[in-house]
Image: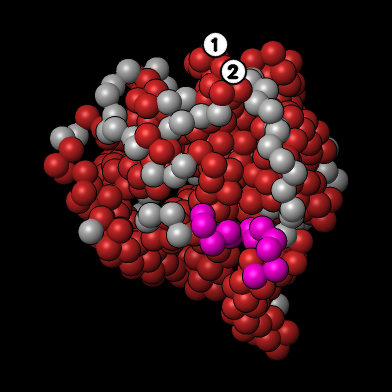
Amino acid sequence: MSQSLTHTPPAVPTSATAPTPAAAAGGVRRPLAVLAVILLGQFMAVLDASIVNVAIPSMRTSLHASGSGLQLIVSGYVIAYAVLLVTGARLGDRFGQRTMFIAGLTLFTLASLTCGLAWNPASLIVFRFLQGIGAAAMVPQVMTLIQVTATGNTRARALSAYAAVISGGMVAGQILGGLIVSGDIAGTGWRGVFLVNVPIGVALLAVAPRILPAPAPRAARRHDLPGLAVLTVSVLALSVPLVLGHEQHWPLWTRIVLGASAFGFAAFALVERWVHRRGGEPLFADRVVRAPGLLLAAATLFLIMCTFGGWVFILTIHLQSTLGYSPVHAGLLFVPNGVTFGLVSLNWTRIPARFHRAMIPGGLLLAAASTIAMGLSLRDGHSIDPLDLVILAIMGIGYGLAFSPLMNRATGKIPVTLAADASGILVTCVQLGVVIGVATFGTLFLTLATDHLAAAHALGTTAVAAGATLAVAGILAMKAAR
């Protein structure tokens, strides 16, 4: 992180960097301390979207969970997290970002404790939803605090660190999850992947009230309850049938509900227009959606995280269930990917500016090619070899060249007055991408993986689908760069 705060980034438009006086006063005093606190909270939230992946086989054995139950344990957190992010951002505007960050962190920490004490799959799914609600209250405040407490080059560097935390957190989750599960500290086994959040959360709660600035809350904002209700139902209608359909052999209800989700998202768009016409404040406010390049960036981020989240999920299952690797062995195999991902995310601004326009689509095409190459390499069922690790490292470079620059570009032109809503929309798209990725690519893989040999072929087929999705993201990025 320190390195990301020393290089010279691209200039950021002044309209996006003028903080409120109160915020600026709070940010100037201890900007690095503020950044450290909020990014550690962000890291915990991102980590928990992926750390459970490595613990899946242990959960299956310990809790006697079904495949659909495991997918709900993974996705339940992200579903709650995704659909409530914009509401969390609005609450930050109303009650103050520091207040909502601390409230979300408190709920997240308590929910992590209850997840670690869960006694069956149903209880763990419920506690994961509560954990996601806490993350939704905490996370939108991070980008908003960065945008309103930092200016100029400092703000751009902080956003690069923010993007690196988001991009690296999922990979770090695989590594840390493997170490925790294999270490079996005090006999906690898989429970340790949740309990590790408790001491970190308590430490942050001890320092956050003294470190974080307390900008004055803005005028009370109305909440878009109709939009929130329709969006929640639509996301559940899309994700739940995808998660449960495979194990239940796609009964009629799953197909009906899945088809209805398309009408649900169309209804959400109509509801948002209706709320806007009535003088309300829709979740996806028109003035925010019209911000330059925001929609294309949001769609591209969605596809990136859809592919990345789904690929990490199925590769983890393949490494442990098909190849028989231990959790720590499987987790450590993600190190090359995580290292290159993090290094590129933190240092991409060192690349000459004339290459920045082509960097994002180029990175996505590199990630697409390496994903397909990885899947085809493992299609014969062989163990991971040095060439596969090289491919994983190249994949990390591709994602790093795309994700951090795209996030920085999307936020760099957003005025401070729109920071809360814009951050909620962007992070919502990122988290919805993870939900849909785990559900779709996970379902494709589990449907094809009928036995040991079929699982290896299923990985190859799923990798081709993931690569194609990344290629579409690259096309969107090319349009955004024009």
Q: Are marks 2 and 1 in contact (CB under 8 Å)?
A: yes
Is 281 a magenta residue? Answer: yes
- Residue 367 is labelled as none
Asked where in the image residue 293 lies, by quadrant, the reply is bottom left
Left/right placement of residue 157 relative to residue 207 reads left
On the image, numbered disc 1 is attached to which residue?
A: 29
* Magenta residues, start to end: 277-288
Q: Foreground residue, 277 or 102?
A: 277
**Amino acid tagged 2:** Gly
In the image, is residue 31 above or below residue 18? above
Q: Nearer the viewer, residue 373 or 367?
A: 367
Q: Is residue 471 magenta?
A: no
Q: How many marks?
A: 2
Q: CA distance from mark 2 to mark 1?
A: 6 Å
Main secondary structure of the magenta stretch: loop
Q: Residues within 10 Å of mark 2 (few under 14, many from 20)?
A: many
Q: Which residue is mark 2?
A: 26
Task: Tell me which amino acid carries mark 1.
Answer: Arg
Residue located at (50% from left, 65% from top): 441
Q: Residue at x 33, y 67 (%)?
A: 472
